[in-house]
Image (cartoon, grey):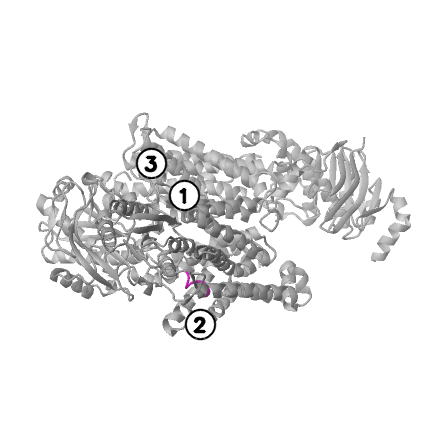
């Protein structure tokens, strides 16, 4: 295989793993909780900021990777208990309220930044050479972390007692509250968990991208489309959806212009979603 | 007002945005079509007029508006049929698709050379009416006022007709409406087409009165801002959103000077507080206060 | 029956709305400033939004320059008054505030704009409909030849030609062109193509990425696969850093050049900025006595914007813009737009940041002293060569 | 010709069979009851009749023409009207507007825009409101009505369009005995003009009212007959006794 082909395959894997990692948190909050969370991008951003600050003041991005899910998870818990929980019965309200939260977070960061954007160095900056192609190790780390994370969460949700309780609660809140599980804290905990995952994703991917206020917002539309293609109500669907738009996008990007590729993917996704008959987005009230 | 061109231009712009707000209010506020990308149609009208006036000698505002309205309505029809024919789709799906359309439009306006590759189309000439140039701020104001007034009157007539009741029925419970025998998809498509034509005519007016069009005109920022005006003003009322638009634009101008970087944050907080405490919009505040007074009085 | 269909009291409500709207809006008219003998200079820049940082620099430079002029007696004996407006990185806001400057504040000149879409949006409001002089102080994609509009930043040929010629002289034969998908990169890269081909080099690839693409891996791979001797790139934020990082870390062997590398932009790239080649009208190490003294004074008077005095933030262009206008007014002995516009065509400055400048008659652009520079890992720049005055190929002298 | 004929209708949700090979019919001016315990599939069967879901197998005929896969709109046009289990009326709208909404459903958009049929419907609205004891509430929002009145309003809305087939899903749920009796009278009166299908789990209410009753259990129709026959049917006793 030529180095170009190796790089081509690597790009497809890398771009899809990045999008899947970004979508994992959303798969929990939008996919399973069915909260149309417009501030998901800003949760990613908050994770990236946490990592950036740790890198800058502690000189160690590893601490940032550890702290980001904790900080963003707690923030998510706070959000859920103060605001989000009011909107479970009102999906449009949830959309608008979380849009407002995202706006506030984004603009707050903008006023604090002294440059248009800040680069963040990856904790591992070296590359390995395979077949003549030099591949950044950090991207490989992201691939494995994404895979492990997706498998682990899937396992917890399907096989463990806790996971089953969570799924039962989200599927039928009335039933479970009778059986003694606190629905209130189950929802809060799940939202916090989804936030923590997004925060972690932000910390992981910011070295590949760059820290700027629209980091999350610019990724948001693709993230949403991934979730909607995958369908709501379960965890794995959105991840499959992410792969389903990232892989063709990355392959198309190699042969035609990335501009056309991106528009084409969004366009096809809209049409695909129209005829995919599941989730609260399709019918039902 | 004639003495101050700047103020006249601000009012003109508010009237033009008012047309856009009416189109969102008819869709979302009255019929429950959660359009999150109405600016795409606004931009469409603007770019159509921009292209025509800069590539030909046509400047007659009547013809320009007509073309914009037709193009907007046809586009609205295509999107409407895609979204609403056949099986029902959820309101959030509509929101995401319209948002994505707005995103694609902004992207195309940035890419396509014929659309100015991001710089937009400058140098749009003053419009003419019966061969006479409308070349002053006051003239443009009257033009916008007339079109806005027609749009508003049409909207009032529609909302207060039997069809307005039908629109509300589709908004409040579209499945129930189907069981009464309403052609739900035709109602939604009809409203969407009318709203698209309104938005496009607003865009056309924007193009001739400002003399330029740019990608942000069809983009996410304007799309979401329009929804914000409707939320803050109270969806389901025709005048609430218009009041919110006027109020916010006026405050916006002051605040951009006074607290430039804090202003967007304050807008976000205002929206959040409204969503939590006054889900029917700021204009519902007096009624809400009255109600709570009554409650305390009776208890 | 009708009573139920028609909402109650709509006429009353309309009256109330119109009244409140008028009241609100009338709050926006300001009492006209007292007839002082000052002359207003409109300063329009993005204080907020994506280009807020650039606006911070622009504002400080404008303030600094106007203070300096006022201290030395003003223009035609009248002091200058700065009217600052924020265009918020948004074309629609820009036209509104431009209209305010022209129609309400009645400024004598407007200097401003960061992005090209702002220039395009406001120039008719100011120069055509408003009949006021508009100075556009930014390096840009070219082709701005409107009446009453004057360009004080560098034209594409002034940056591109010497950069490409230098690369060719270093034995670079194959070029890859990469940019963000909008007008500026497209025009710059089309100039690059022209000069490369004229100089005997070849183009091995040309590609654009969406404006908001945060992860340009595809483009990085295409560049690496091309094995080009040189990469000329105009990928703007947010892609700049990730793109250059990817190319450098991916083991790109060639030289990377562009139009947007200097002390202002390099920090957003990080240590991968090392070795980037470009041509600007100013770099911090420019050491003629006038430039050195002026920049030092600026940093002292404007500590809030110290470190923001850079070519890509248009700082030198803002400085000379206001002085060039002053020179034209003094030459015309009037603030009248038509007269100043006529005088502008051949006006020159002996002292300016980076060296003397003069309008090339008929071109609406400046003969500019340019510098070939190379970026270092810490974001600073080294001047490879001082190129002297370069003529613009614009408007009447398009080549 | 039967008014409504359901022949061998089966409805599956994935592997779950909600209705299994059910057949029944309704004649003109007949009141037919469909009973069964919760989860017996009677709501699902009703939904396949009104078009909320579509039968997996079998056919549904209204006045001899097949409607199995028709949309709810088209079924409404063919003369079917429904009252849902939980009253689905427009709570923010007035009683008058609610009835008007039912009446104008088949008007063209252009007639609606001109409010062309407003006058003609006014008489009809007053008439139907009087019949359902809602006259004094005509200009009150529907949300201010009592629970029973809301149910009546929905029945009134269904009756207003002079349907040929009236579907009633638990029409007396949550009503007082007095209201139940009134409702029974209203339904009786309605049956003079159309066929009625009542879905209930309460045998006592419909045995007075219905000409015939079908009993659904685990998706199967286990018995059909006159109220007296049904009451004495051992299978029906079993179904109801095992539940209690």
Query: Which residue range is magenta in the image?
Result: A203-208
In the image, is residue B191 part of the stretch drawn in magenta? no
Q: Chain of mark 3?
A: B
The residue pinned by badge 1 equals B108
The residue pinned by badge 3 equals B208
Point 44% across, 31% down: residue? B70
The residue pinned by badge 2 equals A62
Residue C139 visible, this angle: yes
Q: Chain of mark 2?
A: A
Q: Disc 1 to disc 3, how far (Cα)?
A: 21 Å
- Placement of C213 over or under C18, stated as above or below: below
Q: Disc 1 to disc 2, how far (Cα)?
A: 40 Å
Q: Disc 2 to disc 3, how far (Cα)?
A: 55 Å
Q: Secondary structure at mark 1?
A: helix
Closer to the eye: label 1 or 3: 1
Quadrant in the picture for residue A260:
top left
Q: Are marks 1 and 3 in contact (CB under 8 Å)?
A: no
Q: Secondary structure at mark 2?
A: helix
Q: Which is more N-terminal, label 3 or label 1?
A: 1
């Amino acid at each position: 295989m030529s180095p170009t082909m190796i790089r081509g395959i690597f790009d497809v894997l890398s771009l899809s793993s990045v999008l899947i990692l970004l979508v994992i948190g959303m798969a929990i909050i939008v996919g399973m909780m069915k909260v149309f969370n417009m501030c998901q991008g800003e949760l990613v951003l908050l994770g990236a900021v946490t990592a950036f600050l740790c890198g800058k003041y502690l000189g160690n991005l590893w601490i940032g990777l550890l702290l980001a899910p904790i900080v963003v998870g707690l923030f998510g818990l706070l959000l859920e208990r103060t605001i989000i929980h009011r909107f479970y019965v009102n999906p449009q309200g949830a959309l608008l309220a979380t849009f407002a939260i995202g706006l506030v977070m984004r603009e707050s960061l903008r006023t604090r930044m002294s440059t248009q954007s800040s680069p963040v160095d990856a904790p591992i900056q070296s590359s390995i050479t395979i077949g003549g192609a030099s591949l950044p190790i950090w991207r490989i780390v992201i691939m494995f972390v994404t895979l492990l994370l997706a498998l682990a969460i899937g396992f917890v949700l399907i096989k463990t007692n806790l996971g089953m309780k969570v799924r039962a609660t989200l599927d039928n809140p009335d039933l479970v509250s009778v059986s003694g599980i606190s629905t209130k804290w189950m929802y809060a905990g799940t939202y916090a968990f989804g936030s923590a995952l997004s925060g972690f994703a932000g910390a992981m991917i910011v070295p590949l991208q760059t820290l700027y206020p629209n980091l999350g917002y610019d990724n948001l539309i693709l993230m949403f489309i991934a979730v909607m293609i995958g369908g709501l109500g379960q965890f794995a669907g959105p991840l499959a959806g992410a792969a389903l738009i990232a892989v063709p996008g990355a392959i198309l990007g190699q042969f035609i212009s990335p501009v056309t590729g991106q528009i084409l993917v969004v366009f096809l996704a809209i049409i695909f979603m129209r005829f995919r008959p599941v989730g609260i987005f399709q019918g039902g009230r | 007002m004639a003495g101050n061109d700047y103020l006249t231009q601000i009012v003109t712009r508010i009237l033009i945005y008012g047309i856009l707000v009416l189109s969102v209010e008819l869709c979302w506020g009255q019929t429950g079509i959660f359009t999150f990308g109405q600016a795409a149609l606004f931009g469409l009208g603007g770019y159509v007029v921009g292209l025509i006036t800069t590539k030909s000698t046509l400047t007659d505002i009547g013809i320009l508006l007509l073309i914009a309205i037709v193009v907007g309505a046809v586009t609205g029809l295509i999107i409407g049929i895609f979204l609403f024919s056949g099986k029902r789709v959820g309101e959030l799906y509509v929101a995401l698709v319209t948002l994505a359309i707005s995103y694609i439009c902004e992207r195309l306006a940035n890419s396509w050379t014929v659309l100015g590759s991001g710089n937009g189309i400058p140098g749009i000439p003053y419009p003419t009416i019966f061969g006479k140039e409308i070349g002053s701020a006051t003239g443009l104001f009257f033009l916008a006022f007339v079109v806005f007034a027609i749009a508003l009157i049409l909207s009032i007539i529609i909302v207060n007709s039997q069809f307005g009741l039908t629109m509300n029925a589709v908004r409040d419970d579209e499945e129930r409406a189907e069981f009464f025998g309403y052609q739900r998809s035709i109602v939604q498509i009809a409203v969407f087409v009318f709203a698209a034509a309104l938005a496009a005519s607003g865009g056309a007016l924007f193009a001739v009165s400002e003399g330029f069009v740019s990608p942000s005109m069809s983009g996410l920022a304007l799309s979401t801002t329009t929804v914000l005006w409707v939320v803050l003003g109270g969806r389901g009322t025709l005048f609430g959103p218009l009041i919110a638009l006027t109020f916010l634009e006026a405050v916006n101008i002051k605040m951009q000077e006074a607290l430039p970087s804090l202003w967007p944050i304050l807008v976000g907080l205002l929206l959040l507080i409204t969503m939590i405490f006054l889900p029917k919009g700021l204009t519902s505040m007096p009624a809400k206060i009255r109600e709570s007074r009554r409650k305390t009085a009776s208890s | 029956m009708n009573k139920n269909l028609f909402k109650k009291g709509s006429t009353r409500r309309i009256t109330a709305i119109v009244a409140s709207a008028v009241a609100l809006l009338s709050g926006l008219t300001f009492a006209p400033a007292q007839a002082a003998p000052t002359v207003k200079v409109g300063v329009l820049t993005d204080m907020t939004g994506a280009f807020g940082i650039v606006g911070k620099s622009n504002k400080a430079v404008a303030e600094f320059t106007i203070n300096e002029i006022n201290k030395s007696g003003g223009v035609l004996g009248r002091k200058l008054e700065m009217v600052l407006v924020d265009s918020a990185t948004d074309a629609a806001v820009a036209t509104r505030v431009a209209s305010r400057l022209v129609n309400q504040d009645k400024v004598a000149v407007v200097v401003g704009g960061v992005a090209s879409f702002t220039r395009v949006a406001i120039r008719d409001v100011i120069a055509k409909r408003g009949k006021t002089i508009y100075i556009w102080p930014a390096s840009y994609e070219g082709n701005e030849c409107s009446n009453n509009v004057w360009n004080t930043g560098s034209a594409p040929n002034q940056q591109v030609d010497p950069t490409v010629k230098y690369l060719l002289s270093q034995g670079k034969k194959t070029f890859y062109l990469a940019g963000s998908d909008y007008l500026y990169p497209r025009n710059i890269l089309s100039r690059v193509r022209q000069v490369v081909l004229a100089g005997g080099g070849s183009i091995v690839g040309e590609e654009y990425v969406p404006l908001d693409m945060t992860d340009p891996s595809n483009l990085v791979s295409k560049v690496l696969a091309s094995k080009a001797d040189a990469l000329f790139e105009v990928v703007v934020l947010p892609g700049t850093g990730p793109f250059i990082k990817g190319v450098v870390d991916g083991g790109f062997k060639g030289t990377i050049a562009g139009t947007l590398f200097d002390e202002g932009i390099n920090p957003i790239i990080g240590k991968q900025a090392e070795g980037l080649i470009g041509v600007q009208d100013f770099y911090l190490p420019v050491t003629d006595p006038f430039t050195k003294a002026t920049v030092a004074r600026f940093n002292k008077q404007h500590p809030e914007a110290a470190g923001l005095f850079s070519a890509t933030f248009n700082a030198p262009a803002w400085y000379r813009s206001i002085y060039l206008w002053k020179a034209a007014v003094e030459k015309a002995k009037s603030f009248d737009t038509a007269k100043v516009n006529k005088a502008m065509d051949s006006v020159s400055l002996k002292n300016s940041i980076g060296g003397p400048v003069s309008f090339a008659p008929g071109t609406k652009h400046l003969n500019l002293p340019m510098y070939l520079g190379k970026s270092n890992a810490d974001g600073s720049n080294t001047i490879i060569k001082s190129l002297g005055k370069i003529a613009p190929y614009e408007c009447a002298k398009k080549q | 010709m039967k008014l409504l004929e359901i022949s061998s209708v089966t409805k599956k949700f994935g592997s779950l069979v909600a209705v299994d090979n059910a057949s029944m019919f309704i004649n003109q001016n007949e009141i037919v009851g469909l009973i069964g315990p919760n989860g017996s599939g009677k709501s699902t069967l009703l939904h396949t009749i009104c078009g909320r879901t579509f039968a997996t197998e079998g056919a549904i005929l209204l006045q001899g023409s097949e409607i199995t896969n028709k949309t709810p709109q088209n079924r409404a046009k063919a003369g079917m009207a429904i009252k849902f289990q939980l009253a689905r009326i427009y709570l923010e709208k007035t009683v008058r507007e609610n009835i008007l909404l039912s009446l104008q459903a088949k008007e063209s958009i252009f007639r609606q825009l001109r409010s062309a049929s407003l006058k003609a419907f006014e008489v009809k609205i007053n008439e139907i409101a009087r019949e359902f004891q809602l006259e004094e509430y005509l200009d009150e929002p529907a949300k201010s009505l009592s629970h029973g009145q809301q149910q009546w309003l929905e029945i009134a809305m269904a009756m207003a369009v002079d349907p040929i087939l009236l579907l009633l899903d638990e029409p007396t749920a949550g009503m007082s005995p007095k209201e139940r009796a009134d409702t029974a009278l209203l339904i009786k009166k309605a049956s003079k003009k159309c066929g009625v299908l009542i879905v209930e789990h309460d045998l006592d209410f419909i045995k007075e009212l219905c000409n015939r009753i079908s009993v659904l259990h685990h998706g199967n129709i286990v018995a059909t007959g006159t109220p007296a026959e049904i009451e004495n049917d051992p299978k029906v006793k079993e179904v109801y006794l095992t539940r209690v």
